[in-house]
Image (cartoon, rainbow, N blue to C red):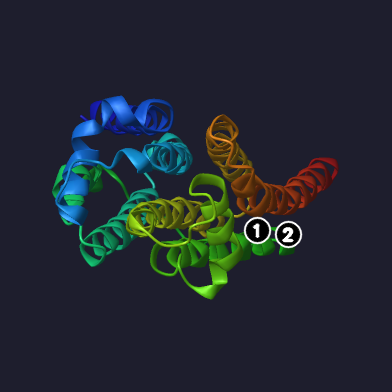
Amino acid sequence: MFERLHRLLLGSCGAFALVGLTVAVAGAPVFAFWRDAVADALWGTSFPAELRSYAAFTDGVLGGSIVGKWVACAWLVHVPIRQRARWGLVALLAAHLVWFAIDATASVLYGAPVNVWMIDLLPLVVVGGLALALWPHTKPVGPSPKPRPSVRVLLAVCLASIGTGLAAAFAIRSPLFALYDQATADTFFAGVTEGRWVAWQRFAYGLIGATLAGHFVALAAMLWRAPTERWVLHAVATSMTAWFVVDTGACLVHGAWFNILQINLPSYVGTMLVWAVAMRREGAARAGVSSG
């Protein structure tokens, strides 16, 4: 029974990652029904033609975030949950509850509660149901080993990234994002900083910020509970790279260089520099143990 449930959970992670990729590359045709439902909630119309180019870009950003989050979750399923460590299930549930809370709150706050039942409930029910079914087959493990300084720094980066997700979800129109908002207007709306696109931006970045926060909750949990395990560093690298490739590819397709320069490169390079130090220190520590 455990093996079957585990395979279903791992397969669900892969399936939802493919959904994210579909959102990024073919969001308009595949999810037209969802766009129109959200547009009806926001404006009482079908999706506005003047927003299609911008929405294709936000689909790319959202899709990249979805892919990255599910790659991170797949690592939780592949290693600690497969080893029947209960903390893996706790981390998986925490990541999805944080995502759901932010996503659903933003959807309601920005006037599109339809997103909650059309999109949000499915992954929550699937992951939550499988996690609860697996719960009796797992067991608590002992205290976490003390993380090395480089891993603590990487953990701090992940915690800060959760805060960035919250800011994107609820403060995208604040002065904090003034340069980003102006660049968005210049790229897609001839410099016009107000209009119907702002409502879509708030809504879309509510979803993007929620997904970002969920991704980094998963990574932070791994770094906290298994700070000396090399697979955790692989999880950070693969999930970040998956996000970066999909998101940046979408930006290039839609001419959104501002997002690459202001968001993607600083986030990816900054995180991976810290990751590289942690990886090197971990390798040196293992070599020291082996030689000893």
Crowd tier of the residue under label 2, counting other residues whose Cα lies within 10 Å: few below 14, some 14–19, many 20 or above: some
Front residue of 98 and 198: 198
Front residue of 289 and 193: 193
* Res 190 seen here: yes
Front residue of 276 and 132: 276
**Vertical relation: 198 (above or below) 236:** below
Q: Position of residue 63 (x, y in %)?
A: 42, 38
Q: Secondary structure at mark 1?
A: helix
Q: Secondary structure at mark 2?
A: helix
Residue of label 1: 154
Residue of label 2: 150
Q: Amino acid at mark 1?
A: Leu
The residue positioned 60% from the left and 37% from the top of the image is: 241
Nearer to us: label 1 or label 2? 1
The residue positioned 26% from the left and 32% from the top of the image is: 31
Crowd tier of the residue under label 1, counting other residues whose Cα lies within 10 Å: few below 14, some 14–19, many 20 or above: many
Lateral position of residue 114 relative to residue 28, left or right: left
Q: Amino acid at mark 2?
A: Ser
The residue positioned 56% from the left and 37% from the top of the image is: 251
* Res 132 seen here: no
Lateral position of residue 211 relative to residue 8, left or right: right
Q: Are marks 1 and 2 in contact (CB under 8 Å)?
A: yes
Indicate which disc residue 48 carries: none
Residue 234 sits in quarter = top right
Q: Position of residue 66 (x, y in %)?
A: 41, 41
The residue positioned 62% from the left and 40% from the top of the image is: 237
Q: Position of residue 5 (x, y in %)?
A: 24, 31
Front residue of 161 and 126: 161
